[in-house]
Image (cartoon, rainbow, N blue to C red):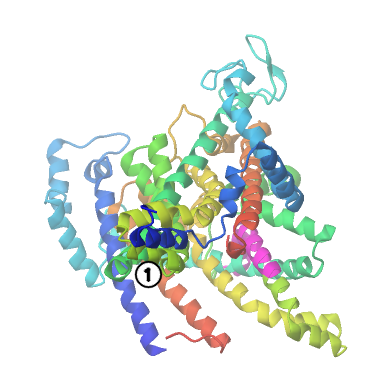
Amino acid sequence: MADLTPEKLSQDAARKLAEPVVPRTLKTAITANVTSARKTIWKFSKANPSGAIGGGVLLVIIVMALFASLLTPFRFDRSVGSRLAPMGSEARAGGEMYLGADEIGRDVFTRTLHGGRTSLYVGLAAPLIGVGIGLVLGISSAYFGGVIDLTTQRVVDALLIVPGLVLAMVITLSFGFSLQIVIIAISINMIGGVSRVIRSHALALRESQYVEALRAMGASDTRIIFKHLIPNSFAPAMVLFAVSVGGAITTEASLSFLGLGIAPPRPSWGSMLSNAQQYFRTGIHIVLVPGIAIGVTVLAVNLFGDALRDALDPRLRGRS
Amino acid sequence: MLAYVIRRLLLMIPTIFILGTALFFLLRVLPGDLAVGMLTTEESSATAEEIEELREYLGLNDHIVVQYFRWLRAVLTGDLGDSPLFDTSVTSILWSKLGITLELAVLSVVISLIWALPLGIISALTRGSFLDQGIRVITAAGISLPNFWVALMVLLVLVAVFNWSPPVQYVHLFDDPVENIKMLFLPALVIGFRSSATITRMTRSMMLEVISQDYVRTARAKGLSSRTVTLRHALPNAALPILTLAALLLAALVDGAVIIEVIFNLPGLGQLIRESITRRDYELIQGIVLVIALFMMVWILVTDLLYAWLDPRIRYS
């Protein structure tokens, strides 16, 4: 009896109201235990066969990139065979070069695997940073409104209209051609779009009853934003992340292709393609392999991302 | 309506200001010295006095804030400065290069509309069929394959199979239209491949939304042929967002142009952007990005207004 004070009662009521009104599809999907996770995957695959194929292919690519050093005896920065050796030729020190050698005799298969590491690393890290910043920016912009909103949105406007690749080129040239700089340069391009979508989502959340209840309880702005609004915007953020990965991989490849991406010797599919350009007639395999690698990876990512979007957030359908 | 346009135009000012300022300081972080770059050739390098003299002349010795306000004042009067690299005003260089990229952009959007619209409609009408699946795979590929690889493949096939490569020397549209189109057709096709995939997707989803509506069923029930229903009743209502998308794609083509113009050796804005960035011509980069940004903002506004004009249900206030 002692703990049922009116104050406690109203707190309970407020806490009930504070239960999010947004359907928690993502949360249920993620926190499910193993058996239902299997069921979820099965359901997802049946509803989106192309997405499941994309996811499967992506898994294979990730495993191959992760275990690159176990899958090949060669090093990516050492010449091991004769220049432009065709597919399946013998390396000098023995061992088969499945995909031949490049213009200075390095094993193409090894370089493609290690290039995959670069691509996947950038492809996952850049959207993570971009979506993260865009999420906080979009939510604070919507939550505080007024002058803050107006100013933030002008910055977002500026980010949206500047050609993304051009901005990334300027950034890498200014700050250096390291992996970190490339990731930051690509992630900056995503902030604008992400914060726009999240802002419109958060504008609706801000008006919901549970936020009002939280305010009535005296919760601070920081608490509302970080403990309630951000977790509740997780589903659209996840979707935005999934559909950004492909673009990040392509942008990285474009930067490297133009010679403004990650510096050698770290292999990147874009720079491999760029070097291969001159060997059109003599070594067609070094043009084909990195290009197919980029194409298959981005296709797999996009198919998976689209399916994820359909499954998680039907409202975002049609945006691409 | 007028108030809306004025508000939108006013909102452009802070955006451009933020962009220009950010760009100005970002570019000043660039390592390497413009004066050294301008004076150093492959055979000779300049003396310290010569470099100092040029730095003084270019105003590079002033404090960065002084440089900033000098630049701001010039921009406000419509003067984008001079390009040290080309030794002329940025505006005149921009004018001479803009045409090529604009032609490329328009051509690629036209090409992609020509086949993306029918494909999208067919895909929607035969939803779930093998044809639809096939079209969806092609569009997924169009969005996924990087355009520079597609460009290289096109060149590869042309050289390997037909032993033909596109003309290298650029000719102006008004000098020799046939040769000009010959040169721009392939790059436009490659850029268009990507945008057509987006347009096909949009057309498909819009058509699917429209054909399930009551008035379409009524039109069918009246006994109209399915061709009439599709082309006269469904398509016009699905077309608006598609047109907007096409207009927006036109603005987004700059990124693609940078790489495609380099590969096909077209002396357009894309090539200019790459050159000015790699050769550290601040004034030129700033000028190009500001002009592109302004152009895009106005273009997006025009698209929004067009939307309202085409569809009376939409009103801005």
Q: Which residues are magenta?
A: B176-205
> Hey, which residue is sitting farthest front in the picture?
A1
- Count residues near mark 1 (Cα–Cα under 10 Å), then give few for <14, some for 14-19, many for 20+: some
Instruction: Where is residue A149? Give x, y as percent.
Output: 33, 67
Q: Would residue A143 be found to the left or right of residue A21 on screen? A: left
B19, A40: nearer the viewer: A40
- Vertical comparison of A99 with A211: above or below: above
Instruction: Where is residue A287? Give x, y as percent.
Output: 63, 36
Image mark count: 1
B191, A227: nearer the viewer: A227
User: Is residue B53 one of those drawn in magenta?
Assistant: no
**Who's the residue at 24% across and 35% down the image?**
B45
User: Is residue B185 one of those drawn in magenta?
Assistant: yes
Instruction: Where is residue A244? Give x, y as percent.
Output: 53, 50
Characterize the magenta stretch by its predominant secondary structure: helix
Q: Quadrant of the N terminus of chain A?
A: bottom left
Which residue was labeled with disc 1? Answer: B294
- Vertical comparison of B5 with B205: above or below: below
B6, A112: nearer the viewer: B6
User: Of helix, strand and loop, which one carries label 1?
Assistant: helix
Amino acid type of the residue tagged 1 in the rendering? Leu
One can see residue B25 in this view: yes
Chain letter of mark 1 equals: B
Q: Quadrant of the C terminus of chain A?
A: bottom right
